[in-house]
Amino acid sequence: MKILKIRKSDKEQVYRLVLEANEFYKKVTSFLIYVLNMNKKNADKYCRDYFKKDHFLYGIYEEKRLVALLHGRIKHAPRGNVGYIENVIVSPSCQGKGYSKKLYLAFLRFLKAKKIKYCQLDVLYQNKKAIEIYQKWGFKEDALAMTKRI
């Protein structure tokens, strides 16, 4: 198991993980805005930000296979910059091994080195497992996003 910065040359592996996550979202949410009509072209478009210079994209590899990733960035806020976790994906076969926490701690080190004092994320309320993990990490609910189909 290795934590490494994900390179563009690994984008096919990133796409595979995103597709796995998309299958999960289909099971937990009824709002189609969260579920992508995912194919390779859409995955490329969806993941474009992952590889931007100012973004954090690290992954865990088992025998050269990407099995987990964390995509984060620094968001500009009125009272100082904030670290923002865009996505955490762990392959179903590797869940329960603490990989998301290892990636989260690496992201925190990145933020601390940049003198960032806060970290935020969004999570679907139906994703109870992720909510439990984020609460263990010390995240507190401080906002509510609402969606309405029109």
Image: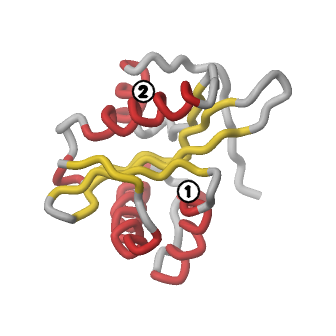
Query: Which residue is depicted at the point 39% across and 66% down?
Result: 14
Residue found at the very far front of the displayed protein: 113
Relative to 92, does residue 14 appear above or below in the rendering?
A: below
Query: Which residue is depicted at the point 66% across and 40% down?
Result: 74
Q: Where is residue 133 shown, x and y percent of the image? A: 35, 28
Compare residues 113 and 111 and report the one nearer the observer.
113
Q: Name the quadrant of the C terminus.
A: bottom right
Relative to 51, does residue 4 appear above or below in the rendering?
A: above
Relative to 136, does residue 61 appear above or below in the rendering?
A: below
Give whichever of discs 1 and 2 has the lower sequence position.
Answer: 1
How was the colour assigned to the protein in this rendering? Answer: secondary structure
Q: Quadrant of residue 146?
A: top right
What's the residue type where badge 1 is placed? Tyr
Q: Where is residue 16 shown, x and y percent of the image? A: 34, 70
For the residue carrying disc 2, how many other residues have a C-alpha within 10 Å: few (<14), some (14-19), or many (20+)? some
The local secondary structure at tag 1 comes to: helix
Query: Which residue is depicted at the point 41% across and 39% down?
Result: 127
Compare residues 137 and 131 and report the one nearer the observer.
137
Numbered-mark total: 2
Q: Could you tell whether 66 is left or right of 46 in the image? A: left
Q: Could you tell whether 29 is left or right of 62 in the image? A: right
- Residue bearing the label numbered 1: 34
Q: Quadrant of residue 73?
A: top right
- Residue bearing the label numbered 2: 134
Q: Where is residue 30 shown, x and y percent of the image? A: 51, 54
For the residue carrying disc 1, how many other residues have a C-alpha within 10 Å: few (<14), some (14-19), or many (20+)? few
As drawn, the label of residue 127 is none
What's the residue type where badge 2 is placed? Tyr
The Cα atoms of the two marked residues, 1 and 2, are separated by 19 Å
